[in-house]
Amino acid sequence: MYTIGQVSERFHIPISTLRYYDKEGLFPEIQRTSGIRRFGEKEIDALRVIECLKKSGLEIKDIKQFMEWCIQGNETYPQRLNLFLRQRRQVEAELAHMNRVLDMLKFKCWYYEEALKDGNEDRVTRMKPEDMPEEIRRAYENSHQNT
Amino acid sequence: MYTIGQVSERFHIPISTLRYYDKEGLFPEIQRTSGIRRFGEKEIDALRVIECLKKSGLEIKDIKQFMEWCIQGNETYPQRLNLFLRQRRQVEAELAHMNRVLDMLKFKCWYYEEALKDGNEDRVTRMKPEDMPEEIRRAYENSHQNT
DNA sequence: ATAGCACCTAAACCTAACTTTAGGTCAATA
DNA sequence: TATTGACCTAAAGTTAGGTTTAGGTGCTAT
């Protein structure tokens, strides 16, 4: 069992944020001894899930909904499974997108390295994809396709 | 040359957002004919860069800074290269993080699939990593290491 | 000529997720 | 005893990134 200060330190989350999460119903079963919150394994686990669901694009109120399903017991397994399946597809799409962003950044790094060498952008701006280094062409084409 | 409405449609960006970007200085050289914005190749390119830099975690005001460097010419190549190198590292870190989030989601999907089969969480909650399916164990360990 | 459409501006409004503030309890230490 | 430190609450404030509103211009089709 940990105090709010210990949890804050261990997970590098501001105390104010932990209190805010609690107020928003993200630790629905947290215990208190004379008013003071006691974070147990359940709440530590909740923190990991919160981090994960937040990163996957969920809002606080939807995470609260999940926490409520957890309390309701066995009958909400389908909803919970469904949520994780949906967020999983979401994150897979997001990863694909981020890989395109990364390719754009790789291309831009190469572009400015060349511009810096040349002292201007003339050569590199006019260069056709087929004259670019293999890896750069791949990155360029992946990040510029569509639109 | 495109009007704001054409750009909005082609890139699925609200007109209000394009105007907002312009107001924030993200199209510093955009032309106008009797008050009406004319989006050229430069601005289309800017849109791609904006998307990329935004996704990589930059704020609008920092993207504006980049656009200003572009106007200033050759002497700002080092700053521009530096920015892209920094954002590239940023996105690589973010991708690594997202992969851990994805592993957590994979684990949770498996967890609730098993709970659903069993009708309760008893077996799956008590299960040790070494008894989990190979791929699930990997996901579990990757998403629960540290903290 | 009048209605509709695409454009324009300035300024007010909105939302999520926090953070800060102001005021208070309680236990241990100087 | 009084001060410090860790906790508490309710409520107000903050921020980024837009969106909405209200009012206006100018072309074109009926």
Image (spheres, coloured by chain):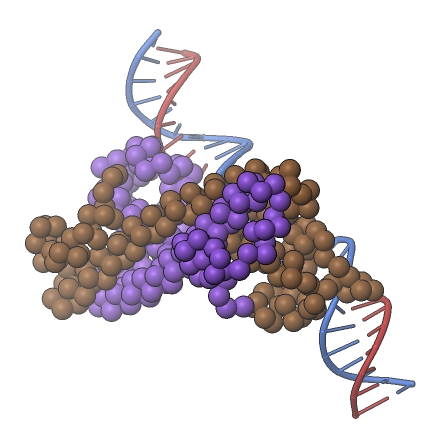
Chain colours: A brown, B purple, C red, D blue
Q: Pick the residue in front: D5 or B45.
A: D5
Q: Is residue D27 above or below residue B84?
A: above
Residue A52 is left or right of residue B39, and the answer is right
Q: Quadrant of the C terminus of chain B?
A: bottom right
Q: Quadrant of the N terminus of chain B?
A: top left
**Residue furthest left as drawn:** A131
Which residue is painted at 49% across and 47% down in the image? Answer: B110
Q: Position of residue A53 (x, y in %)?
A: 52, 50
Task: Answer yes or no: is residue A20 visible.
Answer: no
Query: What is the quadrant of residue C12 in the picture?
Result: top right
Task: Answer yes or no: is residue B37 visible.
Answer: yes
Q: Position of residue A83 (x, y in %)?
A: 53, 41
Which residue is painted at 61% across and 66% down in the image? Answer: A14
Which residue is painted at 42% across and 38% down in the image? Answer: B16
Which residue is painted at 16% across and 63% down in the image? Answer: A115
Q: Position of residue A6 (x, y in %)?
A: 65, 71
Q: Is residue A147 above or below residue A51?
A: above
Query: What is the quadrant of residue B70 in the picture?
Result: bottom left
Q: Position of residue A107 (x, y in %)?
A: 22, 57
Q: Is residue B90 above or below residue A58?
A: below
Q: Pick the residue in front: B111 or A26.
A: B111
